[in-house]
Image: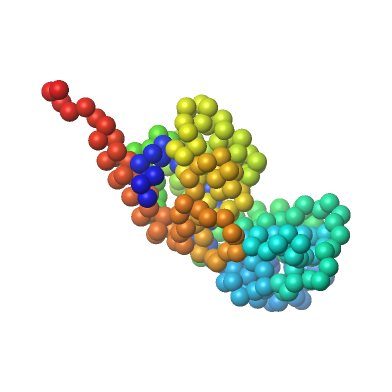
């Protein structure tokens, strides 16, 4: 990865990038569907969710869900191909009512798809989300801080700036990031980033402000549509970090599965950047 020597800015996502949690979705689904018409189907939803994450379902990470027609599309298929919930191709193209489609970029968005499919009100979604976040920090899931990753980020002094961009609003995002004990790891934190469009705007402003080329900026995230596509579109570098298989057809500069791998890559980035700087320093006495 010879291009690492040119990286000046690293942009991090929050969920799935600074931590990984493979169980939170169970509690999230439970909160969404408790005491409603679909509570009896919770075990089915949990099975579907697990199979989607593991790549055993007909639909999953990297696909698009269309609530207006209860159908899926996949980037590797022709645009005319629609699939049902089980992933089976449909013989007709469904009509559209203008409801926004949802990209299945991570486990959070898959839960949002279940909520949309079964008509969970926005208020209940937000309430469930906040409760899950609270319980995660109380140790009620497999969530844990990754100290080697924190060390690698903190020691990444060879780049100009380390930035955290999250779509979480400041009133809740700041509390969560503070509880993660990683506020000090970043030179800049942007809440309510409005990704994906907000990331594209931010990157353009960043290039102007720092007088940088796009390929001097590296974005790391687990949600391709939010974290990577806007950067790739402008010519930036990308790292896709996810433990789950994806049907996403785009090619990223680096594909990682675990936080251990990300920590190792950041250590390598620091090493490469230090070597690059040393090679350009004038020799004393000349």
Q: How many marks?
A: 0
Q: Quadrant of the C terminus?
A: top left
Examine the image and state in which quarter residue 37 appears.
Answer: bottom right
> In the image shown, does 63 or 148 lie closer to the viewer?
63
> In the image shown, does 17 or 123 lie closer to the viewer?
17
Left or right: where 96 falls relative to 132: right
Instruction: Please give the name of the residue rendered at 55% of the width and 66% of the height, measured from the top-left corner.
Output: 245
> In the image shown, does 34 or 54 lie closer to the viewer?
54
Name the image colouring: rainbow
Left or right: where 221 falls relative to 99: left
Name the spot of residue 17 as percent of width and height, x first: 50, 53
Image vertical order of residue 202 relative to residue 232, above or below:
above
Instruction: Please give the name of the residue rendered at 59% of the width and 68% of the height, measured from the top-left corner.
Output: 53
Instruction: Kindly tell me whether residue 28 is visible in this rendering.
Output: no
Name the spot of residue 241 as percent of width and height, x first: 49, 57
Instruction: Please give the name of the residue rendered at 39% of the width and 59% of the height, measured from the top-left corner.
Output: 260
Image vertical order of residue 89 relative to residue 188, above or below:
below
Outermost residue, left side: 285
Instruction: Please give the name of the residue rendered at 47% of the width and 27% of the height, measured from the top-left corner.
Output: 211
Name the spot of residue 70 as percent of width and height, x first: 80, 65
Instruction: Kindly tell me whether residue 276 is visible in this rendering.
Output: yes
Name the spot of residue 235 as percent of width and height, x first: 52, 41
């Amino acid at each position: 990865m010879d291009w690492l020597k040119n990286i000046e800015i690293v942009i991090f996502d929050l969920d799935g990038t600074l931590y990984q949690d493979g169980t939170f979705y169970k509690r999230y689904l439970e909160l969404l569907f408790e005491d409603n018409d679909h509570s009896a189907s919770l075990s089915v939803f949990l099975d579907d969710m697990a199979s989607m994450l593991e790549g055993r379902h007909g639909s999953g990470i990297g696909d698009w869900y269309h609530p207006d027609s209860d159908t899926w599309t996949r980037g590797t298929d022709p645009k005319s191909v629609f699939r049902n919930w089980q992933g089976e191709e449909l013989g007709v193209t469904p009509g559209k009512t203008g409801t926004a489609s949802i990209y299945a970029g991570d486990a959070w968005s898959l839960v949002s798809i279940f909520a949309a499919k079964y008509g969970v009100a926005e208020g209940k979604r937000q309430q469930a989300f906040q409760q899950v976040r609270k319980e995660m920090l109380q140790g009620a899931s497999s969530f844990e801080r990754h100290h080697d990753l924190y060390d690698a980020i903190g020691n990444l002094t060879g780049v100009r700036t380390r930035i955290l961009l999250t779509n979480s609003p400041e009133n809740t995002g700041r509390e969560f990031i503070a509880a993660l004990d990683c506020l000090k790891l970043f030179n800049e934190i942007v809440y309510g980033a409005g990704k994906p469009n907000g990331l594209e705007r931010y990157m353009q402003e960043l290039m102007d402000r720092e007088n940088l080329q796009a390929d001097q900026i590296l974005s790391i995230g687990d949600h391709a549509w939010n974290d990577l596509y806007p950067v790739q579109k402008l010519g930036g570098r990308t790292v896709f970090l996810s433990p789950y298989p994806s049907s996403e057809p785009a090619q990223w500069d680096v594909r990682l599965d675990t936080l251990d791998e990300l920590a190792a890559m950041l250590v390598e980035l620091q090493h490469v950047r230090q070597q690059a700087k040393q090679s350009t320093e004038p020799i004393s006495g000349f």
